[in-house]
C-alpha cells in the first residue's frame, strides 16, 4: 500500500497518458465525423464565437485604420506641402510669363524710340490724393535728369520732375501740372494735352473748327523736343463744342494705365541742365 | 502730460519709426490696395498727435519737417505742406492746452479738422501755381480722404498706450 502511495502520481499520469492515447487511436478511423464531445463543444461555443469574431474583426479594422490614419495624415501633410510648392511654382511661372509679356512690349517700344533709353521699375506712388506722380528706381547715378521723357509699352507716361542719386519722381500725364504738345493722328489737329486728375486728360487749345472725333488717337507732336513725335498719348473719349468760345472741350483717356504701371523706359535725351 | 523741451530717446525712436513706416506705407504698401481718394494722410495723423501731446519747442520744427517730408513724396511744390502743417500745428497746439488731449474722440475730431485745414491750405497755396482744375480734383477726393483719415486716426487711438500720459516732450 505504501508502495502504491509513493508512486500514485506516476501511476495516474501514466494512466491518463495511456487513456488519451487510446482515445486518440480509437478516433483515428472516425476522423471525419464529429463525435459527441466535438458536437457539444461546437454547439456551446458557436453562438458566442460569432460576436467575438465580429468584435475581433472590428478591433482589427480599427487598429488597421488607426495605423492607416497615421500614415494618411503623414502622407496628407506631404501632399499638402507638395501642392503648396507646386502652387508657388505655378504662381512664379505666371508672374514670369506676365513679366515676359510686359518686357517684350517694352522692348518693342524701346526699338521704336529713336534715342537711347533706360528701363526703370516703379517703386512708389504719390502720398497725396490730388497729385499724380510715381517714383522710379533710377536716378542721377544712371544719367537721369529733370525734364526727361518717360514712356511705357503703350505710350507716354510723363516727365521726370525730381531726381535724386538712386531714384526719381515722374510727373504723370494725368497730373494737373502736366502739359504735352499733341496731335490728333487722323486729322493732324493740334493742341496741348493737360492732366485733369482722376486718370484722365484733356486736349486744350484745339479750336472749334478742328476735326476731332471720339475714338481718335492722340499722339505727341514732338514740339518742345521732350516727347518724340508719334508717341501714343491716348484716345479721345468725349468731344464737346459749345455755342460760344473759340476752343472745343476734348477729354482723353491715356494710353497708359498708370495705376498698373510696373516697368517704364526713360528716354535719355534732353532734360534740364 | 509733461511739456518739457526735450524728447526722450524712446519717444524719439518711436516717432522716427512711425514717420518712416507711414511714408513707406503711403508710397508703396497702401497704394497697391487703395485707390487714390482713399489714401490716408498718415503724416497728418502724426502731426495731430504731436500737436496734442508735445511742446511748442519740439512740435513746431517737427510739424514743419513732417510737412516737408510730405512735399518730398507728394506733389511738386516743396514747402506747401510744410507751411500748412505748421499752421495746423499752431492752431491745434493753441487749443490743446485747454482740452483733454488724451481723448480718442478729440483726436479723431482733431484729425478731421486738420484734414479740412490741410485741404483748404493746399487749395489756397495752389492758386499761385499753374494747376488749373485741381480744385475740382481736391473737392472730388475730399469726402473719402476725410473719412479715411478719420478711420486711420481711430485706429491710432486704439493703439496700446494712447490714453496713457505719454512722454512725448
Image (tube, grey):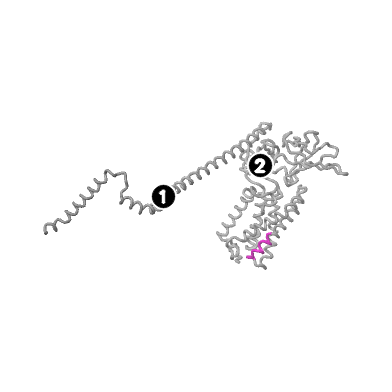
| Left or right of B15 in this view: A8 | left
Residue A35 shown in magenta: no
Do the residues at discs 2 and 1 belong to one chain?
yes
Residue A139 in picture, x, y percent from top left = 63, 41
Residue A170 in picture, x, y percent from top left = 68, 43
* Residue pointed to by mark 2: A261
User: Where are the magenta residues, as a range?
Assistant: B101-111
Residue placed most toward the observer, A22 or A185? A22
Q: Label 2 to label 1, Cα distance in Å?
A: 66 Å
Kindly indicate the quadrant of the structure image that contains residue A5.
bottom left
Going 72% across and 42% down the picture, which residue do you hit? A173
Where the N terminus of chain A falls, by quadrant? bottom left
* Residue pointed to by mark 1: A57
The chain carrying label 1 is A
Residue A33 in picture, x, y percent from top left = 32, 45
Residue placed most toward the observer, A87 or B21? A87
Amino acid at each position: 500500500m505504501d508502495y502504491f502511495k509513493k508512486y500514485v502520481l506516476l501511476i495516474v499520469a501514466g494512466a491518463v497518458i495511456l487513456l488519451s492515447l487510446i482515445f486518440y487511436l480509437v478516433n483515428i478511423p472516425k476522423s471525419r465525423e464529429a463525435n459527441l464531445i466535438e458536437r457539444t463543444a461546437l454547439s456551446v461555443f458557436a453562438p458566442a464565437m460569432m460576436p467575438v469574431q465580429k468584435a475581433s474583426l472590428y478591433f482589427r479594422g480599427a487598429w488597421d485604420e488607426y495605423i492607416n490614419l497615421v500614415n494618411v495624415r503623414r502622407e496628407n501633410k506631404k501632399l499638402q506641402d507638395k501642392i503648396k510648392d507646386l502652387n508657388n511654382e505655378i504662381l512664379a511661372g505666371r508672374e514670369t510669363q506676365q513679366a515676359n509679356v510686359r518686357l517684350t512690349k517694352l522692348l518693342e517700344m524701346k526699338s521704336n524710340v529713336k534715342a537711347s533709353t533706360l528701363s526703370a521699375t516703379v517703386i512708389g506712388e504719390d502720398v497725396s490724393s490730388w497729385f499724380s506722380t510715381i517714383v522710379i528706381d533710377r536716378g542721377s547715378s544712371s544719367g537721369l535728369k529733370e525734364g526727361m521723357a518717360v514712356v511705357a509699352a503703350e505710350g507716354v507716361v510723363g516727365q521726370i520732375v525730381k531726381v535724386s542719386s538712386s531714384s526719381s519722381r515722374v510727373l504723370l500725364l494725368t497730373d494737373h501740372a502736366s502739359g504735352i504738345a499733341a496731335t490728333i493722328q487722323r486729322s493732324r489737329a493740334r493742341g496741348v494735352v493737360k492732366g485733369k486728375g482722376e486718370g484722365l486728360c484733356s486736349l486744350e487749345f484745339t479750336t472749334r473748327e478742328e476735326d476731332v472725333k471720339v475714338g481718335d488717337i492722340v499722339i505727341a507732336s514732338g514740339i518742345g523736343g521732350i516727347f518724340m513725335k508719334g508717341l501714343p498719348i491716348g484716345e479721345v473719349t468725349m468731344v464737346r463744342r459749345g455755342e460760344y468760345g473759340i476752343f472745343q472741350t476734348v477729354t482723353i483717356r491715356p494710353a497708359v494705365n498708370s495705376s498698373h504701371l510696373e516697368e517704364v523706359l526713360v528716354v535719355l535725351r534732353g532734360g534740364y541742365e | 502730460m509733461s511739456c518739457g523741451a526735450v524728447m526722450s530717446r524712446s519717444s524719439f525712436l518711436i516717432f522716427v519709426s512711425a514717420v518712416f513706416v507711414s511714408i513707406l506705407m503711403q508710397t508703396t504698401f497702401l497704394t497697391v490696395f487703395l485707390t487714390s481718394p482713399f489714401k490716408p494722410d498718415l503724416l497728418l495723423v502724426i502731426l495731430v498727435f504731436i500737436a496734442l501731446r508735445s511742446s511748442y519747442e519740439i512740435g513746431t520744427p517737427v510739424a514743419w519737417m513732417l510737412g516737408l517730408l510730405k512735399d518730398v513724396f507728394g506733389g511738386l511744390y516743396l514747402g506747401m505742406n510744410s507751411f500748412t502743417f505748421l499752421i495746423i500745428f499752431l492752431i491745434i497746439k493753441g487749443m490743446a492746452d485747454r482740452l483733454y488731449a488724451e481723448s480718442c474722440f478729440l483726436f479723431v475730431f482733431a484729425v478731421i479738422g486738420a484734414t479740412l485745414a490741410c485741404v483748404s491750405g493746399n487749395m489756397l497755396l495752389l492758386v499761385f501755381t499753374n494747376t488749373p482744375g485741381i480744385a475740382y480734383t481736391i473737392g472730388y477726393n475730399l469726402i473719402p480722404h476725410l473719412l479715411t483719415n478719420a478711420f486711420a486716426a481711430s485706429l491710432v487711438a486704439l493703439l496700446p498706450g494712447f490714453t496713457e500720459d505719454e512722454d512725448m516732450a
